[in-house]
Image (cartoon, rainbow, N blue to C red):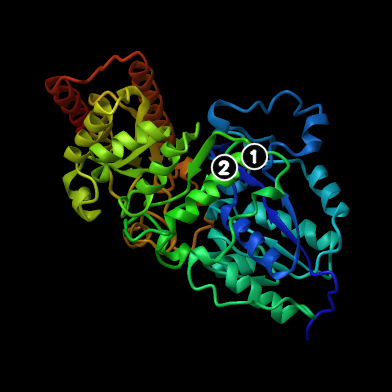
Amino acid sequence: MKKKNDAHNLLLINPWIFDFTAFDLWSKPLGLLYIASFIRELGYDIQLLDCLDKHHPALAVTSAMKGRLKVKKYGTGPFPRQIVSKPEILNFVPRHFSRYGISEEIFLEELKKCKLPAAILVTSFMTYWYLGPKRVVELCRDVFPETPIILGGIYASLMPEHAQKVVKPDYLITGPGEIEVSKLLSSLLENAPAIQNSHKILDDFPFPALDLYQKLDYLPIMTSRGCPYRCTFCATDKISGGYAQRDPELVFQELYENVKRFNIKDIAFYDDALLLNKNQRLLPILEKVIEKKMKVRFHTPNGLHARQIDKKVAQLFRLSGFTTIRLSFETVNPERFADMKYKIAPDDLIRAVETLERAGYSRNLIETYILMGLPHQTFLEVFESILFAHSLGIKIRLASFSPIPGTVDFNRAVKDGLYPENADPLLTNKTIFPLHRNIESYRKFSEIRQFVNILNQAVDRKVNLFKSTELRQGFSDFLQSAENK
């Protein structure tokens, strides 16, 4: 039976993060904001409650937070943080466990101020962050016991059964949510707005509803959704429902309008495959940015495909304002490289770095991702990848492996006894190195991070500690000998 609803008022919530560490590295709930703009266009009234909003007015007068939430370089910065009890399953980790975002007191105050919603939409991100949506649903039920709660997002898409059992929403949406949410609302609410057209492609939807924020430090944008690649450790294809590209004219329109509207310089691309079909998609956008003489800074938190960086790309990057450049590399190991379908080879990384340098980028401003903690990955493989990347004079960003349900590497880890099949998703937390769930391994990986910090500090000073092939080989031989003892 349809529930009576005259106002068509909806409440959208971006939940807290519960983790050992969290940082606002251009993090906005873009999927939720797309849904917000779409259903608002249909005729719904939208309220947004973002638990991770660093500019929530109540934080400015909270003594515990006052003066601590300074925006750092390029719009990034720390989230508000409160230490909470650590889940028993994570007791072996020698770190504080925290809730990141506004306090529960502020959340409840805001919740009680909201107009009675006809439905509540809650998004979700990492599988090991499910405690955030869980707590949000519990509090929403206390305040609005009769209001249906709909859960969507990454965790809901990857682990729907767990989400239904543990978070206990009334309804659950998997994959892209714009159409599915609108259909569900139509079935739940009396006199619900009808969908006006089929919305077959991504560009049929309105731009994300960034205006729901009182203040923004950066703009999130994407030229495509999903990824056509099938990396063994990635689950993008299970989340985004296929690969969809946007019209570059519309992307530029969104970019241009939002830069003027919000008076912001920093823009973060959310694409998983930003350089795919670059001549038809990204480069025309950058050419327009240059033509309009826009003073912006672009950032790529997701790794760029190094093989796609040629002279034209590097030059347009430089002229248009690309500031944060992170290249995907993952590993120097040839067997694993082959397993990843020959995505990025060491020579590709070398060429990309040299091309960017010729375009005017200093090597110490270029970064690359290296994976550690993969199934059957040795510490020696990680070190060799680190040494190779450092020898190029670039910075290293270690990416810890998280076994994502449904991926090839997750299934391998389970099959080989490295990870329990039905484990609590909290154990997929990359901070704890999930395939090495003990204090000794945790300390060893932490020492690798410290080693990389030393190398990156050297790169900042343009000092290359392992440029010599002989020195790298000697260090590798030493590590191999130590590992075999």
Where is residue 57? Give x, y as percent.
79, 37
The number of numbered badges drawn on the structure is 2
Q: Are marks 1 and 2 in contact (CB under 8 Å)?
A: yes
Residue at 39% in and 27% down = 447
Q: Quadrant of the C terminus?
A: top left
- Whichever of callouts 1 and 2 sits on the residue coming sooner in the sequence is 2
Mark 2 neighbour density, 10 Å: few (under 14) some (14–19) many (20 or more) = many
Q: Relative to 180, is 169 on the left or the right? A: right
Three-letter amino acid code at the position of disc 1: Phe
Q: Position of residue 373 (x, y in %)?
A: 36, 43
Residue at image position (57%, 57%) is 31
At mark 2, the secondary structure is strand
Q: Is mark 1 on a helix, strand or loop?
A: helix
* Frontmost residue, 46 versus 385: 46
Percent of width and height locating residue 425: 53, 56
Quarter of the rendering containing residue 321: top left
- Disc 2 marks which residue? 219
Write down the quadrant of residue 78 in the picture.
Answer: top right
Q: Can residue 165 be seen in this view?
A: yes
- Depicted 158 relative to depicted 92: above or below: below
Residue under label 1: 262
Quadrant of the image containing the N terminus? bottom right
Q: Residue 104 carries which label?
A: none
Amino acid type, label 2? Leu
